Image: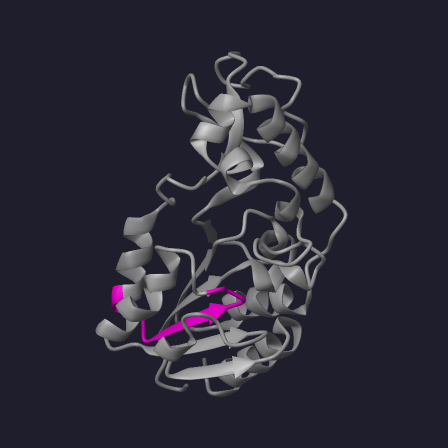
């Protein structure tokens, strides 16, 4: 670890599950009550915008009732104390990393507390409901949608992510299923560029075999221990 100068960290639903946010593929999770095609695709939004807007209003309201956990706080500590370069990429649309203390988080799948205007294409911070068709704060058009990446849409800032992976000494995946692309392919990109790879997950994921090192357990236990290792090695 003393030789690690550049780290890219990818977090997924598993890190937020310990705070009480249901994961995408969890049994009985909030997605179980809705077909993905209905609430997480552009076609679903075009077909029934009321359903989609109400669904994300519900998720935004639920987010206010949960708190960041030890894993979020540990990654914030790493960001503050690590002497090298660190990029924290998350597939999660919640704000638990930020509330846990992280200052620079790349939300590749967008943010629940952000609105995207389909008329002027501007983004605005958003805490209120959207189902009542509020006007865009920028252009005043009633054309807001959740600023989240739906199936069939391109994740955000992919060029920045790939550039960081190409330069990374270590790629770490925390709480991901290893099944959702393009993020599931990051580990192979890191390996191709000579980086060390580490998976921290509750159980082995679909992509575990790609990682040189894999640890199983709760993120709230594994992540603080790993951060201690990095920092004690001179990071």
Q: Is residue 99 magenta?
A: no
Q: Is residue 116 visible?
A: no
Q: Residue visible at 66% across and 52% down?
A: 29
Q: Quadrant of residue 195?
A: bottom left
Rendered view: 144 above or below 8: above
Disc tally is 0
Q: Quadrant of residue 130?
A: top right
Q: Residue visible at 54% across and 34% down?
A: 38
The colour scheme is: one colour
Left or right: residue 176 compared with residue 27: left
Q: Quadrant of residue 69?
A: bottom right
Q: Is residue 113 visible?
A: yes
Residue 147 % position (x, y): 50, 34
Rendered view: 129 above or below 218: above
Residue 186 % position (x, y): 34, 64
Q: Residue visible at 50% across and 27% down?
A: 45
Residue 115 % position (x, y): 53, 30
Picture quarter with the C terminus: bottom left
**In the rendered structure, which segment of residues is drawn in magenta?**
166-177
Picture quarter with the N terminus: bottom left
Residue 165 % position (x, y): 30, 64
Left or right: residue 140 compared with residue 207: right
């Amino acid at each position: 670890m003393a030789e690690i100068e550049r780290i890219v960290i990818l977090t997924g639903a598993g890190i937020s599950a310990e705070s009480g946010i249901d994961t995408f593929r969890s049994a009985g999770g909030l997605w179980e009550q809705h077909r993905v095609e209905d609430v997480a695709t552009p076609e679903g939004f075009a077909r029934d915008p009321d359903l989609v807007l109400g669904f994300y209003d519900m998720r935004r309201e639920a987010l206010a009732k949960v708190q960041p956990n030890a894993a979020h706080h540990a990654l914030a500590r790493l960001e503050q104390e690590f002497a090298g370069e660190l990029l924290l990429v998350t597939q999660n649309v919640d704000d638990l990393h930020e509330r846990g203390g992280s200052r620079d988080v790349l939300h590749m799948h967008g943010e629940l507390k952000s609105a995207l205007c389909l008329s002027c294409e501007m983004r605005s911070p958003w805490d209120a409901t959207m189902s009542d068709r509020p006007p865009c704060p920028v252009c005043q058009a009633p054309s807001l949608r959740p600023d989240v990446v739906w199936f069939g849409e391109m994740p955000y800032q992919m060029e920045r992510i790939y550039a960081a992976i190409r330069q990374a000494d270590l790629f770490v995946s925390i709480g991901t299923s290893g099944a959702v692309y393009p993020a599931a392919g990051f580990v192979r990109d890191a390996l191709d560029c000579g980086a060390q790879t580490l998976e921290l997950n509750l159980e082995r994921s679909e992509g575990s075999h790609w990682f040189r090192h894999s640890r199983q357990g709760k993120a709230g236990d594994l992540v603080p221990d790993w951060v201690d290792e990095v920092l004690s090695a001179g990071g």
